[in-house]
Image (cartoon, rainbow, N blue to C red):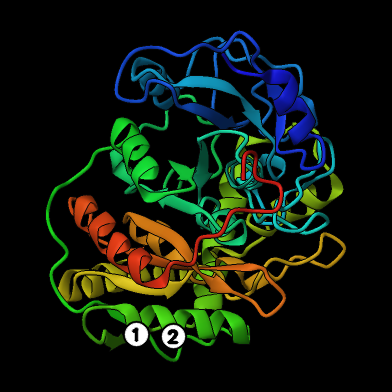
Amino acid sequence: MIDFDALDAANEPLNAFSDFDRTAVFGAGPLAGMTIGVKANIAVAGMPWHAGLAAFETRLAERDADTVALLRQAGAAIIGVLNMEEAALGAKSDNPHFGPVHNPHRIGYSPGGSSGGSGAAVAAGLCDAALGTDTMGSIRIPASHCGVYGFKPATASVSQQGLEPADLTLDAIGPLARDLDTLERVARVISGFGDDPLEGTGATLTEHGVEVHLDVARAFAAALAALPETPARAVLSHPLSRIRFAGFIGVSREMAAHLRGVPTSERLARLLTYGPRRSFADWAEDRAILERTAAEVRAVVEEHGFLILPTVPNPPFPHSDPEPPAQADFTCLANIAGLPALSMPAGWTADGLPTGVQLVGNAGAESGLFALARQLDDRLRAYRPSQHQQGA
């Protein structure tokens, strides 16, 4: 029996769920007994499918997205839809229509985004797992900021049916959870999963041009030291900030076309002007950067087995602060290359906020990616329950 009154009370200070489905029940299957929340840009039959947009507030999904249907068939109870960044463009989750989502580790702080409700709900124990979407890091950024685990499947390995898109060339639906076993169980149900091992010493980027917070750098150094072997050093042709900007331009172009005529906040309307007003020559340069980066990242992963990076260069920040523009500098690479990536807790700042580390692997080697994550997890032991976690 699911106690929705208790969930309502626990959700109130966080605003992670925008709607609960009080008719939700468990089924039979490998996920029997598991409660799952779903980001509001993924269709859940009979539930609001608003994607964080006021214009879609009353829109109800007629049927489940493929990923949601697979979870139901596996026995999970889909207990509601989760608050998010407006239209999934941004990494703060301060929604102008549905209100801000608060980080369970510190009220008043961002949980990251755009799947902020997914990260917060999982970290607070409101559900066992959650679905988010990841266009340039929107699963892994909240996983890092909320101190939980998040997995972005390879782009081609998970259905996009029932997704309100940002950019279908980059989008992927994936899970967040408080432990790797739950994360893998959900990931196996919704996405293609390869059993190849990760072979090689791994690689990490140097000369990437990103300013990394001191506590994030310390946690990442500990993660590097916990690897079985010292990773190789890799360099990309372009600074990560330029790569991320090129990705953003592509997303802005796609979303501007998709949301043409849909009323939005002033902030989102402004972001949707960047792509369309880009000159033909500049957009050609952006595309060339994305294509070269995709090839280079795939080559690094193919040669060295995996790429290890900080998830986010900064720790969680107050909602009253501007969103740091570099949050997706590291995470965007896996989307651009179409590769699976996993974020996990790496350590804590001096004032008690979580940081994350991510692993990017080859499509077809998802089992190997999880195996490596378990090795790191055993050595780092960085997961801590949040102050607002139910039953903690």
Q: Nearer the viewer, residue 9 or 184?
A: 9
Q: Determine crowd level at label 1: few under 14, some 14-19, many 20+ residues with C-alpha closer than 10 A.
A: some
- Please state if 195 lies on the left or on the right of 98 as rendered: left
Q: Looking at the picture, which amino acid does disc 2 mark?
A: Ala
> Callout 1: helix, strand or loop?
helix
Name the mark on residue 221.
2
| Numbered disc 2: secondary structure | helix
Q: Is residue 56 left or right of residue 159?
A: right
* Residue extending farthest bottom: 207
Question: Residue at the location (62% across, 52% down)?
Answer: 252
Q: In this figure, which residue is indicated by the disc labeled 1?
A: 225
Is 366 placed above or below 334 here? Answer: above
Tell me what residue is drawn at x 51 percent, y 11 percent. Answer: 25
Answer with the quarter of the image where residue 187 lies: top left
225 versus 292 height, above or below: below
Q: Are marks 2 and 1 in contact (CB under 8 Å)?
A: yes
Residue 274 visible? yes
Residue 189 picture location, percent across and down: 31, 31
Picture quadrant of residue 349: bottom right
Can you give x and y, in whole percent of width and height, for residue 132 in the image?
A: 53, 41
User: In the rendered image of this protein, does residue 78 appear above or below residue 148?
Assistant: above
Which residue is found at the position 70% from the left and 53% from the top?
387
> Please, what is the three-letter code of the amino acid marked with disc 1?
Ala
